[in-house]
Amino acid sequence: MQRSILHALLTLAPTLLFAQGDSSPAPSSCWNVRTLNTAVGSHRPPAGTTDERAAAVLWSEDFENGLGAWTVNTQTGAVTWQLTSTGNTGGYTPGPLQSTTGYPGGSWVVADSDLQGTAGVAENSTLTSPPITGLDTVPFMLLRFEQSFRQLNNDITQVEVSADGGVNWTVFPVNGEVPGNQSTPGAPVAQTVLLNISDALNGGSGDIRIRFHWLSLEGFTYSWQVDDIALLTVEANDLRMLSATYADWSPDEPDFNGLPYTIYPVDEVRELKFKALVVNNGSQAQTNVRLRADIDGPGTNNTVLYSAPVVLQPGQMDSLYITGYTPVATPGTFLLNLEVVQDQAEDLPDDNARTLRFDVGTDRFARDEDAMQGDRDNGGEAYELGNWYHIRSTKTLYAIDVALSARTDPGTLLTASVYDEDLGLLMGALEHEVLASELNLQGEHGFITLPLIAPVELEDGRDYFVSMGHYGGNEELWVATSGTSAPQSSLILDGGSGQWFYVTVTPMVRMNFDPAAALDERTLGGTRPTALPTVFDESTLVRYELERAAPVRWELRDALGRLVRQGDEGTRPAGMHGIVVDGAGLAPGVHLFTLIDGERRSVIRIVRNGAR
């Protein structure tokens, strides 16, 4: 299936946050659908990791004696690299950098947009080292530094290396994996970044320059703090796993079948595509390099798989794949140990493996990591936020599960919807008034189940989009996020512009196939009302019986859960009564009629002819 709707939506040049012909900004940390956001001139993928190594130090800088001969060049904006001993301390910032020689008591450098920036004013500032000489006989080298970074939207942080005194520069983007409104892991405790800069040295250089480059198109964002920079020797045999997944997927694929789902229903398991990105950080060629996948499934469903072997020369990077594995359709947890192995004895094995997991369940379909890591809203504007799913077997969707952050105001109305592969609305859920007890703090995973107004039959081989919704206004509704999403696979509908954008954090929005989650046509005390006819053109008569005199009100909601009509019948005596629902002006489709009899509520479905 070709997702033609995505091609038809508005697209932007990479990294821009404004729609063509529209001066209103896009929602924070999101981009227009079908526009990839890749740093211009990228040379290496992000490679941030906590890394403790005993390699020999060739050169270092800890800024304890000030900036010295380091130079600052600010081309645009007021944000300029500066020496600090306090760091970034503005709202929602992680605080001063706790590096090896940093806070407390030390000094480091910072590009502080939160302190110096102005909204709407682009920022472009570099910090460049003095000449680093005497290393022309060292062809292989690692650059290590400690950092703390917080992303707002699409701020760009780059490390740039010159081997010819600053004439030409090789760009190493970093922090591209940090989602919007989140910080590097553990911040303000420093994260150690290790980059193999051997390719930039062209076999060795007598005049090396290192440059830290801060770029923000929108201005007034957060900060990048850096300290304890060093050039290191490399070991002879040192492979490093930069990233790993059990389900490799790209926006160029025709559907969302291959996404890395975290919970698969038993009838939705599918072939997985393992992938690891590996670099040879050593000085010697590595032979028979393979990805090893040790799979610990439920019960006795364990296996070990290997990728095809490759040879990696010093500084070379390659992707290793394992295909052909389909998990057994048995409920339980699958623990995955993905490790890169080679013929040579690994000198530094700590960064050669990743541990991942997914679950097979009975009635939930999920993309999130089951623990709130962040949250997002839309700045008071109405919005919908959710995830794409691909269905492989025909089934019935009864409800949508949503997790909310504790920054949500209790009493806010929450809705949910399911869309087809062309983003055509299929069905909505009944509005839900959020309770304080339903909200989540960091690491929690409480979900609100929103029954659809009518169950929806999902067809095999189709993509579907499920989302939560907020009407906007002063009451805030923050959706919990957990994990990262590939471009195009999680979307937000901005109510202000009416446009879809993609986000790179994963909303905690799930499919629920449990029949018990369906909206009951129920009466909470008394006799359930009936509609004659249930499917109507001009009108239908809703009949109900009261056991005793009571005040009677009614509400009619559409397939989105929106209130479209309501009435107050006053106090009615005991006995049979009727309410005429006029079809004039009522959109075709399923509607929910709620009768409020004092403290009792009764719910039935009626259908305005034209859509079943």
Image (cartoon, helix red, strand yellow):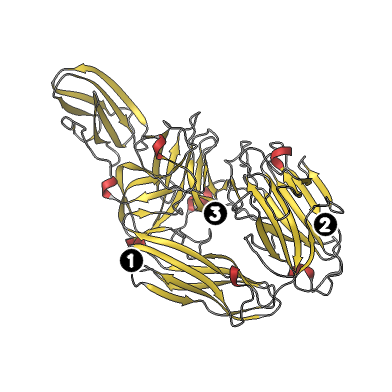
Q: Secondary structure at mark 1?
A: loop
Q: Position of residue 568 (x, y in %)?
A: 27, 19
List the residue tagged with mark 1: 329
Q: Rounded to the nearest whole Å, what is the CA distance between mark 2 and mark 1? A: 56 Å
Marks 2 and 1 in Cβ contact (< 8 Å) = no
Q: Earlier in the sequence, mark 2 or mark 1?
A: 2
Q: Residue 499 versus residue 194: which sits nearer the camera?
A: 194
Is 242 left or right of 569, judged from the image as shown?
Answer: right
* Discs 2/3, front: 2
Q: Secondary structure at mark 2?
A: loop
Q: Earlier in the sequence, mark 2 or mark 3?
A: 2
Q: On screen, 19 above or below 464?
A: above
At a point 48% along the width and 63% down the height, the residue shown is 356
* Discs 2/1, front: 2
Quarter the C terminus occupies: top left
List the residue tagged with mark 2: 129
Is 289 left or right of 148, judged from the image as shown?
Answer: left
Q: Rounded to the nearest whole Å, what is the CA distance between mark 1 and mark 3? A: 29 Å
Badge 2 crowding class, 10 Å Cα cut-off, few under 14, some 14 to 19, many 20 or more, is: some
Q: Is residue 392 visible?
A: no
* Discs 1/3, front: 1
Tell me how many marks there are: 3
At a point 74% along the width and 44% down the height, the residue shown is 123
Quarter of the figure with residue 270: bottom left
Q: Position of residue 318 (x, y in %)?
A: 61, 72
Q: Amino acid at mark 3?
A: Pro
List the residue tagged with mark 3: 487
Q: Position of residue 162 (x, y in %)?
A: 81, 63
Is 62 left or right of 245, judged from the image as shown?
Answer: right
Q: Is residue 355 visible?
A: yes
Q: Amino acid at mark 2?
A: Ser
Q: Amino acid at mark 1?
A: Ala
